Image (spheres, rainbow, N blue to C red):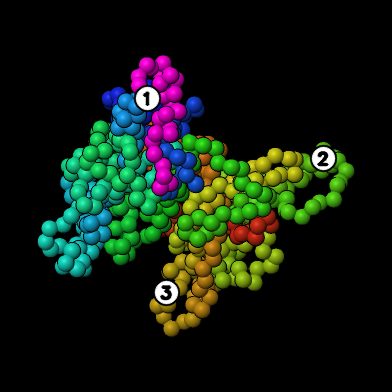
Amino acid sequence: MTTAAVAAVSAEPPTEEFLYSNMEYLASLDPPAIQPVLPSLPEGVGLLPVDFQLTTFIEREREEEREREEVGSERRESTETHGISIVLQVNAVEDVSLPFAQRLRSIVPSEETPQNESQQMSVEETLRSLESNEPASTRRGRRQRLLRLTLTDGFSRIIAMEDSQVSCHCLRGGVALGAKLRIFAPLKIRHGVLILTSEKTVLLGGFVPELQAFWTQHATAILEEMSGRSKRRTLPHLQNNIHTLLAATSISAAVAPPPPSINTTTTNTNGITPFVEDVVGSRAQPQQQPIPIQQQQQQHSDFLHSTNVGMSAGNNSERSLIQNMQPQPLSAWRQHHPPTNPFLTLAVISDVRSELTIRENVRNPLGGTTQFFSLLVMLITPPRLTNNNSDNKEWYVGLGRVRKEEEMELLVDLGHRWLRQALRMEPDAFRRLSLSRDPNDVANLDRLVNDIGMELENLGEALFLLRQREVDGVVEVMELQRLSQS
């Protein structure tokens, strides 16, 4: 076993390097720098089996050692059980006895922390409003603290709670995110939840900065959304969606996920169904003769065109297509036929409706598979075209005619092309980055998320060249051109 693995399962004092390392990052290395000490759970997260104990795992690790030692079996059984311990990392912690507002206040940055003034005011106003609406009973009398923690061995995440009758002594002063806890056998498990007691729990210390940064940003985003301030929703929603996706997938980052099945879909936390499909289709195809090279090349060109991959930012033909087309009201999409033909409209992005996903198993005619970025957004008619400041039912803006009764929303895929340019990387590279636990990679991922959010935040009104994809029927943005700001 490696040094890190020994620290995770033995009673030896762990090194300072281990205490300040992210165990999920150590588990993601090839080979892993640590070994699992928790049972394998579905999706890597869940409740412990009620009959789980550490003796089975530790017995297997120490089998050879026991054979060499000449110790009476009765004495060994009585001493070894109490000496068995494992080290787990604190991934999340909250005092569930506190009202919701106070829990958020304990996470968000303090007033001394440098922050945008309007953002700080929004957060503080929301906290005060929540606290003022709390029942008075929640603020009276002596409160019995009750901490709920998410713990991990790097491979699986479990729920733990301190004993509701007597607080866990080592946690009374608080616990940092990323701190390491040593837990001794026998474990106390109640309904699949690990119960932390003063006699069996030792706080070893440690801290993981990226965990603190994640939960701070998460709490701040919740408060900003609850504040009701009139601000654009694109940036916080995008950041929250992407981080939610990363948090949901980080459980299985250390092990290779099973390959997606052909022609299936998965639903994300927002209820949006990202497409994980085989472009060729599920119907059995008759056996065909080999295709000539020239025809293969033409098929490949058509494939790239239909999937929006072959168009670069400087494609002159695509640029001239936008310049030569007359923009139409967004509502005209209903009558646009066939929908696979290009359609140009003036619109703004009102909201982000899905996580940033990667479409899998997209086959091209020459064999092999391709991956595409995908992000669903909602397009709406620009507000300045629908604000009726006069008695006229219609008006002109030089980019098409819009009637008040023609206001419309259209869900579209922002498209692989724009997302690839914004991220400046291919899907494979982005997937590796999102699964990495290296602090530099985490910081780089946060920067990319912020960059995309700022791009969407500052986009404003733009010309969107749309077309329905033949492979799945989703309307995709082929090209977009931001209007010059006057």
Q: Amino acid at mark 3?
A: Asn
Displayed quadrant of residue 473: bottom right
Residue 411 falls left or right of residue 281: left
Name the residue tied to disc 3.
Answer: 387
Work out whether residue 280 or residue 192 is closer to the camera in this orientation and state it: 192
Q: Residue at x 52, y 43 (%)?
A: 421
Residue 154 falls left or right of residue 478: left
Q: Secondary structure at mark 3?
A: loop
Name the residue tied to disc 1.
Answer: 73
Label 3: few (<14), some (14–19) or many (≥20) C-alpha neighbours in 10 Å = few
- Residue at the far right: name it: 289
Q: Residue at x 42, y 77 (%)?
A: 388
Percent position of residue 415, x then y:
56, 52
Q: Find out whether residue 54 is within the magenta segment.
A: yes
When the figure is inspected, residue 17 is found, relative to residue 387, above or below; the finding is: above
Instruction: Tell me where the magenta segment starts and ends, as one range.
Output: 49-72
